[in-house]
């Protein structure tokens, strides 16, 4: 029964992306699926029971804008969250996410040296990722920062006109774009393209992997903002930014994996468990830790980047081991990321597929415990609302 209701709710969640600015319009996944299908083959099954890697034993995971506030929706009826313990999936039972402190010195040195070769982002990213800017910047201040990067500004304007945002009329200036889709959304679109400036390649296959990760980061952050505001979770813009930045490590890990293979590339894993398992086998660290190291090299604001790696750790962290003051935010951000990955890969099409996903996919194993948190009490109702 839980699987059915969660499946029904998440199908509405998928629709939320198409309905971000058009609540009554019919949702279509067509703007997303062509790009996703062009991203090359994917590994969408979690690995078998992982063999013990040669690397050291892993450590256990460590336990305002111009947008208008979205009024909470009228609650829909939903059954209580089933918190009955479920058997641990075999693939997840023997898996932990490594931290950089567990990596041998010579391997960590190689990793840091290679990360330093990745170009630093434009200075605008530093300003946009600061908590002060996230919480207090005006639309005029944002427009000034975006216009300081003309190429990025042009890409932002093109993105605003994409079918995703469903604008009914053309916008001519960045100020109009901010008015129509909001300061927070424009800022995150801009941050996405600023990050993409750091990850360029001549390989068509690698470029498709980068594109899939970037599209997922944008979708996940928008979904997160929408739902966080509907359930009145505090600091929604800051959480949205952390969701976007959580993909940085996976972009960087792709670069390092290609280096370790001597320039050859493999398929892109949609499942976070499969992706992290491959990253740890080849690099020694999962993408979340790689991202933390890279953002430190870039000297991005510590206040924003410190907790980014915690999002991916929901994969292996039951709710009782999660930081109590962050558990709800981490769960919502993690859920949005995992759904976005599968939407971009074209794996979510109807409720039957989602029902199987929630029942069998190890990426979602710990989420039912988080969904029982009081701060997330309205989440499934918010999802169900968009299925009407």
Image (cartoon, rainbow, N blue to C red):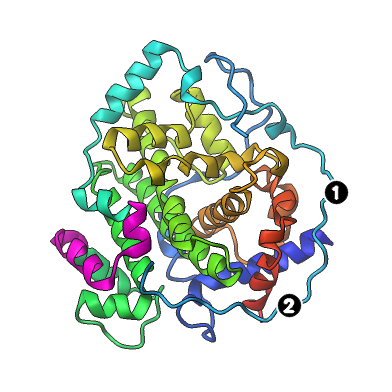
Asked which secondary structure carries label 1, the reply is: loop
Percent across and percent down for residue 371 are 71, 56
Q: Quadrant of residue 117?
A: top left
Residue at x 57% of width, y 54% of height: 329
Residue nearest the observer in this picture, 102 or 42: 102
Which residue: 43% across, 54% down?
Answer: 217
Along the horizontal axis of the image, is 63 left or right of 42? right
**Which label sits on residue 333?**
none
User: How many labels were placed on the picture?
Assistant: 2
In the rendered structure, which segment of residues is drawn in magenta?
130-152
Going 17% across and 66% down the picture, which residue do you hit? Answer: 144
> Which circle marks residue 84 in the picture?
1
Mark 1, other Cα within 10 Å: few <14 / some 14–19 / many ≥20: few
Q: Residues within 10 Å of mark 2 (few under 14, many from 20)?
A: few
Q: Is residue 314 visible?
A: yes
Q: Quadrant of the N terminus?
A: bottom right
- Location of residue 26 with respect to 95 vertically, above or below: below
Q: Is residue 362 above or below residue 385?
A: above
Residue 76, numbered circle: 2
* Camera-nearest residue between 373 and 30: 373
**Disc 2 element:** loop
Q: Position of residue 258 (x, y in %)?
A: 35, 30
Classify residue 67 by image quadrant. bottom left
Going from N to C along the chain, the mark reached first, 2 or 1, is 2
Q: Quadrant of the C terminus?
A: bottom right
- Can residue 196 be seen here? The reply is no
Q: Give the x, y percent position of residue 84.
A: 85, 48
Is residue 239 located in the magenta-colored stretch of the structure?
A: no
Residue 113 position, x and y percent, is 28, 22
Mark 2 to mark 1: distance in Å? 23 Å
Instruction: Tell me if 176 is positioned left or right of 150 in this view.
Output: right
Q: Which sits in the foreground, 274 or 12? A: 12
């Amino acid at each position: 029964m839980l699987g059915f209701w969660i499946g029904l709710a998440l199908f509405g969640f998928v629709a939320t992306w198409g309905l971000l600015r058009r609540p009554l319009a019919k949702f279509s996944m067509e703007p997303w699926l062509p790009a996703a299908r062009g991203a090359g083959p994917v590994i969408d099954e979690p690995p078998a029971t992982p063999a013990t890697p040669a690397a050291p034993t892993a450590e256990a995971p460590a336990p305002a804008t111009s947008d208008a506030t979205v009024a909470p929706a009228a609650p829909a009826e939903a059954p209580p969250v089933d918190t009955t313990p479920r058997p641990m999936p075999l693939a997840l039972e023997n898996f932990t996410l490594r931290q950089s402190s567990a990596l041998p010195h010579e391997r960590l040195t190689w990793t840091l040296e290679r990360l330093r070769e990745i170009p630093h982002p434009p200075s605008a990213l530093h300003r946009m990722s600061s908590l002060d800017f996230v919480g207090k910047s005006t639309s005029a201040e944002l427009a000034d920062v975006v216009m300081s990067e003309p190429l990025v500004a042009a890409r932002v304007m093109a993105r605003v006109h994409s079918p995703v945002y469903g604008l009914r009329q053309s916008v001519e200036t960045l100020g109009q774009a901010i008015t129509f889709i909001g300061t927070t959304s424009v800022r995150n679109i801009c941050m996405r393209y600023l990050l993409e400036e750091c990850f360029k390649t001549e390989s068509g296959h690698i470029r498709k992997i980068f594109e899939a990760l970037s599209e997922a980061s944008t979708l996940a952050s928008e979904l997160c903002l929408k739902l966080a505001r509907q359930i009145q979770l505090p600091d929604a813009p800051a959480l949205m930014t952390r969701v976007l930045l959580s993909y940085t490590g996976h972009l960087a890990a792709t670069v390092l994996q290609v280096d370790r293979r001597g320039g050859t590339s493999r398929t892109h894993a949609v499942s976070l468990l499969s992706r992290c398992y491959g990253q740890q086998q080849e690099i020694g660290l999962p993408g979340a830790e790689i991202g933390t190291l890279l953002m430190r090299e870039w000297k991005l604001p510590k206040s924003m980047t410190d907790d980014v790696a915690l999002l991916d750790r929901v994969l292996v962290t039951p709710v009782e081991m999660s930081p109590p003051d962050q558990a709800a935010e981490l769960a919502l951000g993690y859920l949005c990321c995992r759904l976005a990955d599968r939407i971009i890969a074209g794996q979510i099409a109807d409720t039957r597929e989602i029902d199987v996903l929630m029942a069998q996919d190890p990426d979602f194993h710990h989420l039912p415990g988080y969904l029982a948190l009081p701060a997330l009490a309205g989440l499934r109702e918010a999802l169900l609302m968009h299925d009407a």
